[in-house]
Structures are given as C-alpha cells and as structure tokens.
Amino acid sequence: MKKFLLVGAPVKEGIGSAGLLILRVAAGLLMMTHGWSKIQNFEGMVQSGFDPIGLGAGLSVVLLIGAEFVAALFIVLGFLTRLSAIPLIVAMSVAAFVAHAADPLQVKELSLLYLTVFATLFVTGAGKYSVDSILFKK
C-alpha cells in the first residue's frame, strides 16, 4: 500500500489502465450530455447562427455533435481512442480559445478541463480495459 500511495503502480499491473478506464468513462459520459443537448436543440442552434470558425451554422453544429456525442461515445468504449480524442481536442480548443476567448477563466474552465482530459487520452491511449485493447492486441 505504501508503495502504491508514494510511487504508484506500473501500468502493467492494471492500476494505470483502471485509472484510464475511470477517466475515459467519466469524461466521455459527461461530454455526451453536452452533445445530446445539441442533438435535441439542433434547429435552434442552427437558427441562432452558431458558427465559431466560419464553416456555416449547420456544418458547425453537425461537427460539434460528432465530437461531443459520437467521439465521446467511442472514448467511453475505448474504441479508436486516440483518433476519437482529436475532434474533442479541437472542439474544446475552439470552445476555450474562440467561442469564449473574451470570457473570464471561470467560463473557459470546463472546456479547458475537458481539453486536458482528452489530450491526456490522446497521449496515453485507452489502456487495457478497452475495445482498442481487444481489437489491436499484438
């Protein structure tokens, strides 16, 4: 226990992968709630002119739903985790640095936190408790 608390356990023992599983599932499910609300309010978002990077409102909303719901679902499952993290990293970067550029840190904080989580998953991958691990075993 002392070694675990002070040094940590190597990923090969499964502790690191268990941590990645918790991180993936929690962040992915929470992000999916944001995507689901956009699915439910698709027309309203398009009509409001939501277009933070100049792609047109319809395409912007579709891309955001793809990131916040579909890619987040893949993150939860640990399926194509690194590839799935990319649209979420882009979406959270746009949220923090474009859509909320002029806002105080308290407004940007959630998107920056998600950005950090998905960037971490991009670097680490899904861990051994994932669909990726099953599909891409060596």
Image: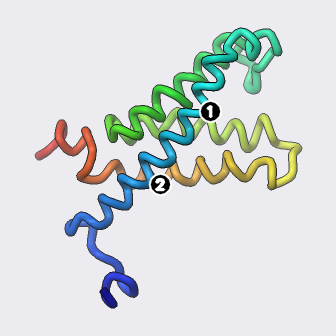
Percent coordinates x, y for residue 15 in the rendering: 29, 67
Apparent side of residue 75 relative to residue 32 in the rendered image (left or right): left
The residue sitting at 76% across, 26% down in the picture is 52
Residue 129, numbered label: none
| Color style of the picture | rainbow
80 with respect to 12 (left or right): right
Amino acid residing under circle 2: Thr
Q: Which residue is mark 2?
A: 120
Quick one: quadrant of the N terminus? bottom left
Q: Earlier in the sequence, mark 1 or mark 2?
A: 1
**Is residue 38 rendered to the left or right of residue 22?**
right
Mark 2 residue crowding within 10 angstroms, few (<14) / some (14–19) / many (20+): some
Report which quarter residue 102 is drawn in: top right
The mark lying in front, picked from 1 and 2, is 1
Residue furthest out toward the left: 138
Q: Residue at x 33, y 41 (%)?
A: 78
The location of residue 24, given as percent across then percent down, is 42, 48
Q: Which residue is mark 1?
A: 34
Amino acid bearing label 1? His
The Cα–Cα distance between marks 1 and 2, rounded to whole angstroms, is: 20 Å
Q: In which quadrant of the rendered view does residue 80 lie?
A: top left
**What residue is at 63 percent from the left and 40 percent from the top?**
92
Q: Is residue 124 above or below residue 32?
A: below
> Which residue, as the protein is rendered here, is positioned at the far bottom?
2
Q: Position of residue 113 (x, y in %)?
A: 63, 53
> In terms of depth relative to the viewer, which is nearer, 75 or 51?
75
Q: Report helix, strand or loop for mark 2.
A: helix
Observer-nearest of 48 and 80: 48
